[in-house]
Image (cartoon, coloured by chain):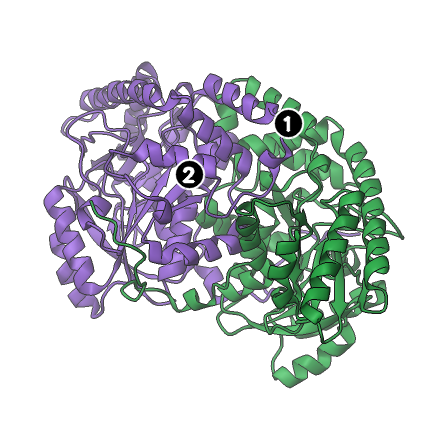
Chain colours: A green, B purple
Amino acid sequence: MTHPPQQSTASLPLASRATDLVGSVIDSSTSLLAKQTHDIVRFAMGSPAPEAIPTRALAQVGAAVMGEHSPDAFDYAATEGDPALREALLDMLAGTTDATTPERLTITSGGMQGLDLAFKLFVDPGDLVIVESPTYTNGSATALSYQAELLEAPVDDEGMDVDRLEQLVEKAGRSPKAIYTIPTFQNPSGSTMSIARRKRLLELARTWGSAVIDDDPYGMLRFEGDPMPSLHELADGDPLVYSVRTFSKIIAPGLRVGWVDADPGLGQLLINAKQAMDTCTNLPLQRLVAGFLRGGYLQDHLVTQRAVYLERKQAMQAALQEHFAGRARWTDPEGGFFLWVTFGDEVDTEALFEPALAEGVAFIPGNAFSPSKRFPNALRVCFASTRPDRIHEGVARLARAVDKVTK
Amino acid sequence: MTHPPQQSTASLPLASRATDLVGSVIDSSTSLLAKQTHDIVRFAMGSPAPEAIPTRALAQVGAAVMGEHSPDAFDYAATEGDPALREALLDMLAGTTDATTPERLTITSGGMQGLDLAFKLFVDPGDLVIVESPTYTNGSATALSYQAELLEAPVDDEGMDVDRLEQLVEKAGRSPKAIYTIPTFQNPSGSTMSIARRKRLLELARTWGSAVIDDDPYGMLRFEGDPMPSLHELADGDPLVYSVRTFSKIIAPGLRVGWVDADPGLGQLLINAKQAMDTCTNLPLQRLVAGFLRGGYLQDHLVTQRAVYLERKQAMQAALQEHFAGRARWTDPEGGFFLWVTFGDEVDTEALFEPALAEGVAFIPGNAFSPSKRFPNALRVCFASTRPDRIHEGVARLARAVDKVTK
């Protein structure tokens, strides 16, 4: 059997959407960074801190789940999710702004599958979808994979600039099918949408008949300020809010366990769509998460994590102040993982990437977060996964790289 | 916060494909059967036998993977798959008809995601896709979720009746974008495509420029007869063959770990598409499978399983002979999980389902395996998950139900 070298796909009967599969700069960075052999301070990925992964509790609960030697734990799960996890999750959410009911809940293979389901259910080719600008690359990429046309709405310190939406939509000449937002500790900007804007966004969505896809992986990681009501809670039963949640940032991303909270009228469609995606989410790790929640590990874990991440955000801001005062500005998130740093026109952050990597620091260039590449002078740093002393070292390295490219 | 009861989706801006999300009779049966409280012999699902799940080895390897307390084991995986699993899998496949190379390999979240990726890459709305008739419901449902038009090609004892394809395609007036086949121990018929037909299928696909989506979850579970060359091996490097494989039937379905073997020209597109589906497959269970393979557990496990499944197939055939000789005919698979039973016109297997459930036996009606419902008098039984004495009991119950509905 021969395997000819890299062939052209010219002879493969690709769908028209294949050209819209843009890939993820963030995910590609995982592979790129894995190949580097020198010391690198990693501000690029949005992973929790390695020391913030509760490995001992996970190992203990995991060994208990598998140690029952029950074949049932390795069988297909119900598509809507394992009952043990669904019940533990409903209890976990009770009393929070994300409280929900069984008929609204679908367990997903991470938050990403929640987005895949949303765009598969709501988007026909050519449909208009509003995304934040900057936005989470993989979210907008998923909308593009269903051939959405994206309309970028600016983000400022109060989240998506909702007041600009009407004007943008008027200019587009048609209503958006969906509005994709990360309202709390936004990725990549770190900003949080104000209550007034949340309410206005819901009003506009009602007017336009748009679905509001509310992606909130970080909401439980608030380390400063007051909690915000979720869009779902503010919508008070309006079916248009579709909420995407995940255990990736609060327990561990490799589990690929998340959930969708959506109108019960979507329930069977979500199940049908998910069956055609992956049949069900893996069962042993659903049981592991259920055991982790039932074991009471999460609440203590969150308290610890919030303190760790606050310290790291402050370390990042102090280091930026030391090295970039007057040369850049940056955001001040009250939770989550990210700071957004904007330089003057003299710094092209895509051109900065390689020299920075050579200096031993990695980040994600701003243009990765905008389908129309509106942020050539900005970059995203994740402060969550690096210890404070290493954060200082990383920012010092970044400063050396900036000095080199702006000489 | 109020949660109004079940609402209409009329106010939700659904995509046109939402009406093509047909759901799975098979997966729905999982939920339905879970609710039954009386004793039921379960011939419905395509799960491995509970006692065929290597729970002790899985628990041991799983505890070792998690017992390292390495945060790395719970982080995002590379989208193409964890290197440890990729290497163990390449070694496992070396020397088999599925032997492959790193640049052709993508780890997926079960075989189902391999199908989702295929139809996402190849199918535009309205494109023609050939499926076997009967075929695996969830496979054809995935094609429908991308709004394919399905053309059903009859299956006989030698698999898809390839000689009929030209005529079918001529009548359709256009070439198929993809041909979806389960060539070995087909689901649901149990039949295996002959070598002559495999070669002819590849010729036709080349002529039409169609992708051949080769779904083979059962190939390693051959308990009789001689091994067959895979379509990939017969294609000798032709990029048109896209192979979908899974650990679901040979280790355990709940792991949701599978792989795709495809032309390297598709590699980056597969990665981009998968990133927009679930970022990556869960990492702890990728490591678990890698450890299971490296620990040498699979080969012994397969030898045991094959013997178990042969005994069960024979028990099923003997019981059918005892109760249905002259009233039905059934297939004689050389491997896999399924037998296909065809009754005369007097038996409507959809109408039979409820009475059979009341008698204490579950199966999947034939029409579930045909988008145009061509098999009202047939049904699928899975012999793999039931012990021989219970198989006899289940078929006796089925006979009582058939007697009732045909009186």
Viewer can see residue A268: no
Task: Establish if B328 lies above or below A357.
Answer: above
Is A364 situated left or right of B266 in this image?
A: right
Horizontal and vertical percent position of residue A348: 66, 70
Task: Establish if B343 lies above or below A265.
Answer: above
Q: To which chain does the residue with label 2 belong?
A: B
Q: Quadrant of residue B130?
A: bottom left
Viewer can see residue A383: yes
- Which residue: 55% across, 45% down? A34
- Which residue: 23% across, 52% down? B237
Horizontal and vertical percent position of residue B270: 42, 54
Q: To which chain does the residue with label 1 belong?
A: B
- Which residue: 67% across, 62% down? A240
Task: Establish if B112 lies above or below B61.
Answer: below
Total numbered labels placed on residues in the image? 2
Dot 2: element: helix
- In this view, the residue in front, B86 or A214, is B86
Q: Amino acid at mark 1?
A: His
- In this view, the residue in front, B288 or B82, is B82
- Which residue: 61% across, 84% down? A173
Q: Which residue is mark 1?
A: B69
Q: Which residue is mark 2?
A: B86
